[in-house]
Image: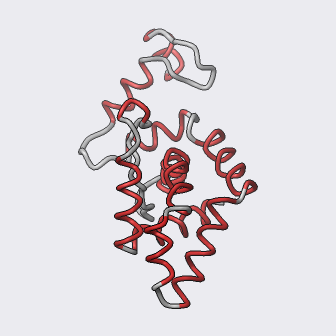
Amino acid sequence: ALEKVWEVVKFICNHQKALARFRDLGAEVPRESRPKGGLELLRCSETRFASKVLMADRYVNCHPVLERLMIDDAYNAWLTKQTREIREKGAEVKRIIRCEDTWDAIKLCIRTLLPVPVVRVLRMTDAKLGATLGKVYAYMLRGVGDTGRRASRTSLRERAC
């Protein structure tokens, strides 16, 4: 499912007209209805941890706008003027966006991987902001662990020894 999301993101982001229409349709969504992180598609990066999962999470947020894009007259008029190869790829993207099985698989992936504390810690340490050991220590001290309950500083120190 993540590879299919990547195909959609790649197609939209690599074609200026498609991306412009996507952004125009996204701008029509009222600010208070926009999800956290906005309505901009994210590309994945091989060097960043969990970037495909984060890309899929943003795809889920942007899915209503993508569905509107697939029925948008300006987008479809643009697509009909393109080469056969681009039209075929556009048709494949439309199938992916409208496929319920793909949609269910993506939502399952997001529900399974994003809430995991390990993913959060690894993303913190994967940041480009320099030293991160302090961030990890602070995260541990806040008591977010496998059980989801708060732990005291003393109990964390005792477990570490």
Q: Is 29 above or below relative to 83?
A: above
Point 41% across, 69% down: residue: 18
Q: How many marks?
A: 0
Residue 117: image x %, image y %?
54, 33
Q: What coloring was used for the rendering?
A: secondary structure
Point 71% across, 59% down: residue: 99
Residue 111: image x %, image y %?
64, 39
The front one of 127 and 74 is: 74
- Left/right of residue 50 with respect to residue 125 in the rendered view: right
Query: Which quarter of the rendered picture does the N terminus lie within?
Result: bottom right
Quarter assignment of residue 130 = top left
- Left/right of residue 142 with respect to residue 68 in the rendered view: left
Farthest residue, direction left: 130
The front one of 129 and 158 is: 129
Residue 97: image x %, image y %?
62, 60
Q: Is 80 above or below relative to 7?
A: below
Residue 59: image x %, image y %?
52, 52
Point 35% across, 47% down: residue: 27
Farthest residue, direction right: 101
- Left/right of residue 49 with respect to residue 147 in the rendered view: left
Point 61% across, 44% down: residue: 110
